[in-house]
Image: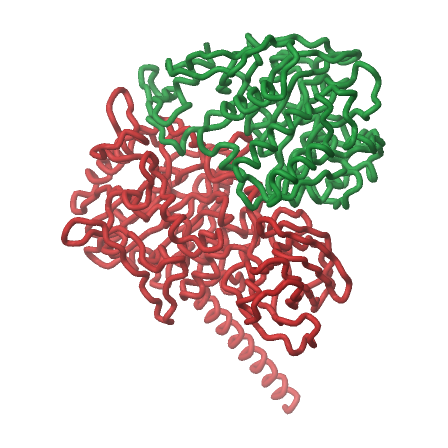
Chain colours: A red, B green
Amino acid sequence: MLHTATEFNRRAFLLGTAQIVAAARLHAAAQKTRVGVVPSNHSGLTHPSSREDPLDYARVREMVWKALEYGKPRAGSLEAKIKRGSWVVVKPNIVSLRSRPAYSTGDVTDLRVTKAVIEYVARKSHAGRITLAEGGTYRNLVDPAKDNTYSQNGARVDLRDFDWGDQEFPGLGGSVSRMLREIAAEFPDKKFDYVDLSYDGVRDSSGALRRVEVPRAANGIGAFGARPDYFVTNTLLNCDFLIDVPVMKVAGQCGVTACMKNYVGTAPREAYSYPGMFSNFRLHDQHSVDNRIDPFIADLVAFHPPDFCVVDAIRGLQYHQHGGKEPDQMVRSNFVLAGEDPISMDATAAYMMGFNPWDLEYLHLGIKRGLGTMDFREIEHVGDEPDRLRQRWGKPREWYGRGNREWRVSGDAAADLATWSRHTSPTDTLNLTRAAGAPAAPGKTYGVAARIQADGTRKAFLWVGALGHVQASLNGEQVMDEENTTKYRVGQFRTPVELRAGENVLVFRVQALGDSPQISAVMAGPRNDGDTVEGIRWSA
Amino acid sequence: MLRRQLLYLGAAAAFARPQKPQKSPEQTDVVIAGATDDQTVRVGLVLSTFKDSEDHYGAKVAGLPDPRPVDADLSDAQLNALVRKALAFGTKGKPELSSMVAADDWVVIKVDVSACGNAAPGRVPGSIADLRVVRSLIGYLAENKCGARITIAEGLGGCGDAWSSEWDGAFGGLSYKKMVAEFSRSHPSIKFELMDLDQQPAIALPVEGKALARRNTEQSYFIPKAVQQCDRLISVAPLKVHPRLGAALTFGNYLGIAPATRYGTAKEGLDKLGEPAEIAVDLFSYHPADYALLGGSWGMEEGRSVHHNLIVAGASAVSVDAVAAAVMGFAPGDLEVLPMAEHRGFGSRDVDAIWVRGNEIEQARRPFRKPAGWTAPPHR
């Protein structure tokens, strides 16, 4: 009996434990953010297609809808999250029209993905108004400027009436306006329209464009950009529900463009373009920080973070974010991602393209605002495994990943390392006079250190930017001795290093040769392409 | 004709650009492009004979102040005017060379000095970069406040006296040492220096993407640190035939960055890694030339120097080399290096898609005797 009882008790205990573990896993899964991952050959599709298949609208629609199902929001479904009568805005990335010299297939969101999202919302939700909103490098029909205008068959067109032909998006020819007309005919109880965000800037009572300050997040975080007030659009501020539908491709200054970078298209070009151009260069000039555009990307998202995201990863561009000269620039991946957390979505997209998500600065800024997580342990990928779809895309030449931010700093390099103070740099570059609180003087030598935790032995390239004479040692061994008195550049000096498993200590001694000594450090992977080596963490 | 069409289509800030119809043959797309969309590659091509003329829009173009026959001995001033004219033509308006190079940049000028000061008669002056062209370029940079440090660099191998050589007076008695001394005096705020890339520290770095050189199993090369670290790299080389590349030009000039300490003074170590064209493109990829200048008073055909006063200049090395190759009488596709470089995204080699400003290629054409033993690859 006792034995039996013991047996029973153990069984009951084991069963109970298993139930607790299962419940805990379920709970954990419920807490995880979901990202739907649906390639064209996904077994759950009615007609799985090769990853090389050009696809047609029916197949793309099924991929998108399946991804929407897999990546459902915490509300249970996309339609459940959209309140009755809502104004839903669908924001694709259509930065260019096909005729633009810099256009290449893969430059813009596949119109079939955009249509599938609109059709889903129209068919399944109680939205009252569905708007396709975008602002690209094309002037609208009433803009008197002559540059960046387009015409077809002798008639001036903008995105609304531009005919993409029947080859660009196989199975879906025509224009945006035709697409919206057809959907409107099928759903007469809903209003469908198009807003050109380039001309939708918020104005004051006199009609002049007005800046709006970046709203503070619940945790008090405000603007990251060089100035806190932006020209933004009425549509972005006033819509009830925003669905972000970017194309997945590389971007020169921030690595990857997907959900968050798509917000650059929400900045009205009527406010941010220079005469004779229709690119938002003024946005870059006014809001970039240390040559990074990530701060203003995160700020623009803050005005109305996406309520849901669908990433078009059917075709994208490697090497450059617009058309380049390489014949293999367009990458066909044939998958779609969907989810409500833009950080998880972008982290997944970056991973799929062979980037280290940790390198994307705007993801860190988004996380500071509480927009989501890039930790894959907190993300549930539903559908296909990201590892199966991951490829290594060609990086932009100017790309480099996120440098270290956590430092120990001293105005006296000879002082005991234990006395060096902690300093968190907001950008890749550490200004030594500011960080050490000690002005530069000829010959003055600053001490700078950081710890690198590696999950195994790692071959890497140490990229250093410096103004001054810099000597670097890793775990007590000198690995670099360089001097620079000309332009400062992240990654100017490079040297191969080997990280040991566990903690590594990197120490720089920077001798001032001018009045503004600076330093930055990126630990690039063995390909030396600017990506941070995998499996490391910086700390002070 | 095609080039003229292209000028019309895409060169300036407001050109209509018809696109290929996608659906119906009668459909035409037209874009009035903005300045940011102007992707037309410009290459300046100027002969010493260049006179006042008109461009394709009928606008007046000032000629050289003192045009001279193409085989005439040019004075320093005449050659300087030739270089400046090519620099003015070989740019997009903005960014020009002067706006491309910042005041605090470190500029490396990679010159081709692949012959020693006492080289065999006939090889100099045509086989090396024209020193007066280099001087004119540096003068342009200094006058326009471009660069805080300007380094003239070359792997000298066994040519230890190349910096001090006056090349038997071939360039008016000019030597690189004299040049640097002159500029250091006239522009004391800029650091001028000579750098033997063979004596510089080198670093093994992986080739971006994948090495073209098929036997380079390591997928990396030793590169002088200066090439990787400088902010801007400008290549200056002669129009010169090459026994294995066909013509050396800008890409051939890059073979000179491979350090002799690693690859031998004749770069024989590179042969183990792949074909010269593959290696040239691999080496170029470490720091693609921000600007390329070819020519001067002399060029080099098989066996002898050629007196041919001409400058080819532009920001796209592939396009500059394509134009120069056409001038030298090479057919499109003759130089294997160009399609390889084009495929890697370094620019267009299609001379019909390049806006050649100044003289026409046909006016400048002077077929060079091809190198012995070299044969054009089968056209694909």
Relative vertical location of residue B130 with respect to residue B188 in this rendering, above or below? above
**Residue A452 showing in the rendered view:** no
Indicate the quadrant containing the C terminus of chain A: top left, top right, bottom left or bottom right: bottom right
Q: Residue furthest bottom?
A: A2
Position of A97 with respect to B297 (left or right) is: left
> Residue at image x 56%, y 50%?
A355
Estimate the x, y position of residue A200 in percent, counting from the top left.
24, 46
Task: Report x, y in % for residue A38.
Answer: 47, 47
Judge by depth and name the residue closer to the eye, B337 or A356. B337
| Residue depicted at 51% across the width and 75% down the height | A19
Image spot of residue B337 (x, y percent)? 67, 23
Question: Image point 76% across, 61% down: which residue?
Answer: A478
Residue at (24% x, 59% y) in the render: A83
Question: Residue lying furthest left in this view?
Answer: A205
Q: Is residue A70 visible?
A: yes
- Closer-to-camera residue (A428/A305): A428
Does A220 sit above or below residue A280? below
- Looking at the rendered image, the quarter that the N terminus of chain A falls into is bottom right
Total number of numbered labels? Answer: 0
Q: Is residue A28 above or below residue A179?
A: below
Q: Quadrant of residue B45?
A: top right
Left or right: where does residue B314 sit relative to residue B19?
A: right
Looking at the image, residue A453 lies above or below residue B357: below
Q: Residue A510's x, y, as percent?
A: 66, 62
Q: Quadrant of residue A464?
A: bottom right
